[in-house]
Every structure is written in C-alpha cells, then in structure tokens.
Amino acid sequence: MKQLVLDLQLPALPSFEDFIRGENAELLYQLGCWSLGEGDVRFLYFWGERGSGKSHLLAAARAMLPAGTQIFFTDAAHDALPASLPKEAALIVDNVDALSRDEQIRLFDHFNTLKDGGGLLLAAGPKPPMLLLLRPDLSTRLGWGLVYQLKPLSDTDKAAALKRRAYALGFELGDDLADYLLRHASRDLPTLYQHLDAANDLSLTEKRPVTVSLLREVLRGDWTE
C-alpha cells in the first residue's frame, strides 16, 4: 500500500528572491521600485512568452506593496476589471491582451484616473504594447511608462531554478536529473516545477530516492496522486 503524503506547509508567497533573474536583473529592480514607490516608476508594462514567469512577478510585486495600499488585481483572461477605482490605487493587470473591447475602454479610463491621481499601474502581456491587438490609444498608454521584455532563461538558469525548487522541497537534484527534465519535458518552468513536485510526492509516498527512473515514471504519467 502507498503511504499518503500530507502537505502541511502553507504555500509561500511569490517573491523576487525565488525568481531566477537570468538577463532580467533590470526589470526586477524596476518592479521593486514600482512596488516601493521609489523613483518615478508609476506605470510599467512587461512582456514575455508563455511560462516565462510573468504571473509570478506580478504576484511578487503585489506582495511588496506597502500596507494600506488599495490594490486591484485582474487576470484579464478570466476576470473583469473593476468598474471604478480610487485615483491613488495600485492596479495590476495580467494577460492584458485578453481584454474585451469594452474592457479596453475601461482600462484606458483607469489609466487616466491613476495618472491624474498619483496611482500605479502594472501590466503584462505576450508582446510589446504596439504589437498587441488592442485599441491604439490603449497601446499608446501602456507604452508611456517603462516597458521591458521578460527574457527567457537559458538552460543553465533553468537547471539552477530546478535545483533551487528541489532544495525547497527537501531533496537534492543532481546535474543529470536536471538535464533529463530539460531534455524530456516541456521546457517552461511552471510545467517543469509540476513534474518536480510530482516526483517529490512519488518519492515520499514510495520511499524511493528521486532518480532518472522515477522521473521517467512521472513524465510517462505512470503515477498519479
């Protein structure tokens, strides 16, 4: 019989510290400035491919906002923007490319409200502002502030991220195991992390070390919780 594994740990809040920077040090610095109100960073847009960590960084920036900040967060792929918001608020929008026509008009209005009132806007999408299929006036507004590309991690950076994740889970991931995952699994970090989490659960359940053989079982789907 398999031993059940009880996960009694509370999920850690996303942070900039647990994000592998790669070539994105300047973006992370500016996100920190945005969150802490340092410098003149009030409007920031960044873009990157699926699985590059955009949602993680948005959540990390949100977690760093000072206590008492009125925060409004919208994942445009699933949720609607707030109908109204205070002029001093912080608005965070993920998947900005998924905004409907009406929502685009609303975000345009929110941008002007925040600009006039000292508020903050942070948004992310898959392409630079002017290449998004949005209203031209909204694309222009998104490009008014700082704009950065979230550059993909190298294989070396991804291996380092996997090793850090494994260490947090309580085991050591050797170079051979990291290389196996990178060669045989989908290469975006969220998926790689899911495989690593599944391998850890299988290891604990069956009291086996994490090996290439165990990873192979996970990738084949031979084991489910």
Image (cartoon, rainbow, N blue to C red):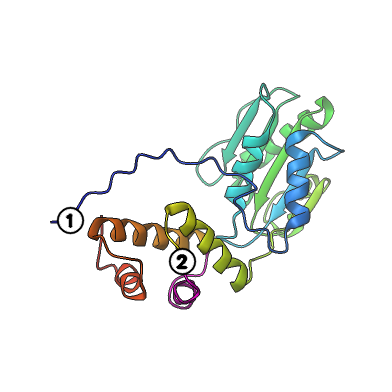
Secondary structure under the numbered disc 2 in the rendered image: loop
- Please state the total of marks drawn on the protein image: 2
Q: Which residues are magenta?
A: 174-188
Q: What amino acid is at disc 1?
A: Lys
In the visual, does 197 lie left or right of 46?
Answer: left
Q: Return the residue nearer the eye: 101 or 180.
A: 180
Circle nearer the N terminus (1, 2) = 1
Q: Quadrant of residue 170?
A: bottom left
- How far across and how far down the image is residue 30, in percent? 78, 47
| Quadrant location, the N terminus | bottom left
- How far across and how far down the image is residue 109, in percent? 73, 33
Q: Which residue is mark 2?
A: 173
Q: Which residue is mark 1?
A: 2
Whether residue 185 is in magenta: the answer is yes
- How far across and how far down the image is residue 103, in percent? 62, 39
Q: Determine if residue 95 is in view.
A: no
Q: Is residue 57 above or below residue 79?
A: below
- How far across and how far down the image is residue 55, in percent? 58, 49
Q: What amino acid is at disc 2?
A: Leu
In the visual, does 93 lie left or right of 109?
Answer: left
Q: Determine if residue 39 is in view.
A: yes
